[in-house]
């Protein structure tokens, strides 16, 4: 059953935040816009297309890994939990987990409201006895969950290595915010992409069909559509770069020539070759993954990886911080 009434009403606050982030990011040096603004409806559709590309290994590998370990997750977590998914998107990886856990409720959280409600409706049809309670919100901040799950033990679900989109300080803030959302004693099943050769990484973010390029350029189209912009989108190109010092793939939008444009009445200029930094995708080895989780207040309980070591899933618990080491 789909608890549509539990989803908060849409307001113009998201639009104001989008505008503020864009104006501040384009005024900065170097220019950058937070990756969360990729996900309007079209952006969400393009990302789902990316996950089906042959070069984009994370979804394929993680889905197979999740299917293999769901029984172990259920044995460790226990059945009857409320599953809270952060950045749920199409929820394609979720059914196997819900079945294994015999979940008492499912709370998908996503910033793309229309896409969220469509996905939640489909999942509610697939699980007619399950309480599905979509929440339209920015999960980068603590989220007020529906009262219907307040008393239930909770398992947070954060697949897809989305944690890698954040610089370490922001990732730690997010992990601590998840504890505020879920509560002490909650569990978190999180996907984390592993460090691997550049020859594998770069094609995953710069595919031959150009779908990732369209996903990146859609950010500019969204700015034009929603923020009264006149950015010449055809004068930008998509770039994916491996930054070994930070162990991350960076996505950029590079100006092909000197350009000027307006957004909401503000004038901006870019020189040929200048970029807008639009996304990071940090990669982790086993040690750095555990350190990041610990800094965010989560204690790893169990870790799994595929046979090739491409991707990992970690089950962690929100335990009270010890007074002493």
Image (spheres, rainbow, N blue to C red):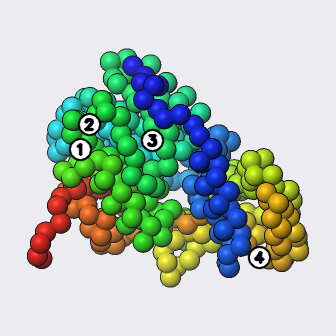
Q: In which quarter of the image is residue 11?
A: top right
Q: How crowded is mark 4: few (under 14 residues within 10 Å), some or many (20 or more)?
A: some
Q: How crowded is mark 1: few (under 14 residues within 10 Å), some or many (20 or more)?
A: some
Real-space Cα distance between discs 2 and 1?
Answer: 22 Å
Label 1 secondary element: helix
x and y percent of residue 161 in the render?
A: 44, 56
Q: In which quarter of the image is the N terminus?
A: top left
Left or right: residue 205 versus residue 81 is right
Of the numbered discs 2 and 1, the one sitting upstream in the chain is 1
Left or right: residue 232 versus residue 44 is right
Left or right: residue 295 versus residue 137 is left
- Which numbered marker is on residue 73? 1
- Residue where numbered disc 2 is placed: 150
Identify which residue is drawn at 79% across, 59% down. Answer: 263
Of the numbered discs 4 and 2, the one sitting upstream in the chain is 2
In this rendering, the label closer to the viewer, 4 or 1: 4
Label 4 secondary element: loop
Left or right: residue 117 versus residue 225 is left
Assess whether mark 1 and mark 2 are in contact (beta carbons under 8 angstroms): no
Of the numbered discs 4 and 3, the one sitting upstream in the chain is 3
- Residue where numbered disc 3 is placed: 109
x and y percent of residue 111 in the render?
A: 54, 44
Residue 155 visible = yes
Identify which residue is drawn at 12% across, 72% down. Answer: 323
Q: Is residue 232 above or below residue 126?
A: below
Of the numbered discs 2 and 3, the one sitting upstream in the chain is 3
């Amino acid at each position: 059953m789909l608890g549509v009434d539990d989803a908060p009403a849409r307001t113009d606050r998201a639009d104001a935040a989008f505008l503020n982030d864009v104006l501040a990011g384009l005024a900065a040096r170097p220019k950058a816009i937070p990756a969360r603004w990729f996900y309007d409806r079209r952006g969400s559709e393009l990302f789902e297309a990316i996950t089906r590309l042959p070069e984009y290994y994370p979804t394929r590998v993680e889905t197979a890994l999740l299917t293999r370990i769901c029984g172990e997750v259920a044995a460790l977590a226990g059945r009857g939990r409320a599953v809270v998914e952060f950045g749920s998107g199409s929820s394609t990886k979720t059914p196997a987990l819900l079945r294994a856990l015999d979940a008492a409720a499912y709370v998908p959280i996503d910033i793309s409201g229309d896409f969220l409600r469509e996905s939640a409706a489909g999942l509610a049809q697939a699980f007619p006895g399950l309480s599905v309670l979509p929440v339209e919100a920015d999960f980068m901040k603590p989220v007020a969950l529906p009262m219907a799950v307040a008393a239930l033990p909770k398992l947070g679900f954060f697949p897809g290595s989305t944690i890698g989109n954040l610089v370490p300080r922001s990732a730690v803030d997010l992990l601590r915010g998840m504890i505020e959302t879920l509560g002490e004693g909650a569990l978190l099943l999180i996907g984390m992409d592993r460090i691997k050769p550049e020859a594998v990484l770069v094609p995953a973010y710069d595919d031959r069909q150009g779908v990732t390029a369209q996903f990146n350029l859609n950010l500019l189209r969204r700015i034009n559509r929603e923020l009264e912009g006149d950015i010449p989108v055809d004068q930008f190109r998509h770039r994916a770069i491996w930054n070994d010092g930070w162990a991350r793939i960076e996505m950029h939008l590079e100006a092909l020539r000197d350009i000027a444009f307006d957004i909401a009445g503000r004038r901006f200029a870019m020189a040929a070759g200048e970029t807008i930094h639009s996304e990071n995708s940090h990669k982790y080895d086993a040690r750095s993954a555990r350190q990041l989780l610990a800094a965010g207040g989560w204690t790893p309980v169990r870790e799994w990886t595929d046979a090739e070591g491409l991707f990992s899933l970690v089950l962690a618990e929100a335990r009270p911080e010890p007074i002493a080491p």
